[in-house]
Amino acid sequence: MERHIVTISGGGFSEETDAYIDNYIVRIKRKDSPIKICFVATASNDAQGYIDKFYSAFQHEEPAHLTIKDFSLPNIQAIVNAFDIVYIGGGHTQSMLKVWRSTDFDRVLINAYKQGVILAGISAGAMCWFEHYTSENSEQEYESFQGLGLLKGALCPHYNDPIRKQHFDEWAKKENLSPLYLLEDHENLHFINENCVAKIST
């Protein structure tokens, strides 16, 4: 069974209409019937406007979303396993992972991935799959954190931002991390079975 992760750096439905990268993700699992795609907006604290944009973008599929309170449902693993794609929104990476770990939703996503559910995510939802990441803490200072470890190394989205670029370069050199994935906005990576197979620029 193939395992897929798509990491998105800027763009997607939150910024574009009929975004190429969103269509690309859907085509990975394209079949005769609509795709069952779920949005998780934990990193933006379940921002309703963000969720509304998701439903508008994927209205021709079978869209759904999960909020923080849903993570405690007794059948949450079965719910997530039934989706074709789980799409993680951007926002505050550390607060997102703190919520996931406190509810065991991180394990739910990892288990679903192993069962063939496609994982996709933008910015925070792209960094989280790697072993390590660096991002702003609650004091808006950059700090090193542990990701979910599905993919080796570390990823820096928005690498075109000079402050983020400088910090990431210094951090990665200090930590001696490898491999490193550097994505400017509207650059994306497709991993199959934990191997990077494509870079998609949109």
Image (cartoon, helix red, strand yellow):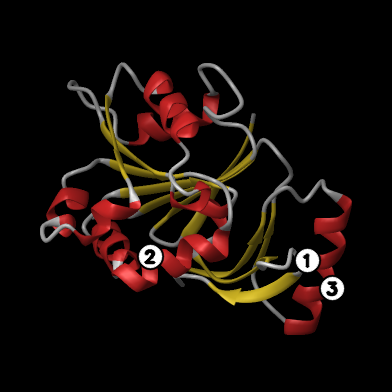
Image point 22% across, 50% down: which residue? 80
Q: Nearer the viewer, residue 162 or 179?
A: 162
- Residue found at x 64% / y 70%: 179
Per the image, label 2 sits on a secondary structure element best described as helix
Residue beneath the point at 25% across and 29% down: 35
**Front position in the image: 19 or 103:** 103
Dot 1, crowdedness within 10 Å: few (<14), some or many (≥20)?
Answer: many
Residue 36 is marked as none
Mark sitting earlier along the chain (1/2): 2
Residue 170 disc label: 3
Marker disc for residue 168:
1
Q: Which residue is mark 2?
A: 100
Residue 11 spot, x, y in % from top left: 62, 32
Question: Left or right: where does residue 125 sit relative to residue 176?
Answer: left
Q: Nearer the viewer, mark 2 or mark 3?
A: 2
Coordinates of residue 109 in the picture (x, y in percent): 31, 60
Eye-nearest disc, 1 or 2: 2
Q: Are marks 2 and 3 in contact (CB under 8 Å)?
A: no
Q: Which image quarter is the C terminus in?
A: top right
The answer to whether marks 3 and 1 mark residues whose Cβ atoms lie closer than 8 Å is yes
Name the amino acid, label 1: Phe
Residue nearest the viewer, comparing 25 with 76 = 76
Q: CA distance from mark 3 to mark 1?
A: 5 Å
**Residue 104 shows in this picture:** yes
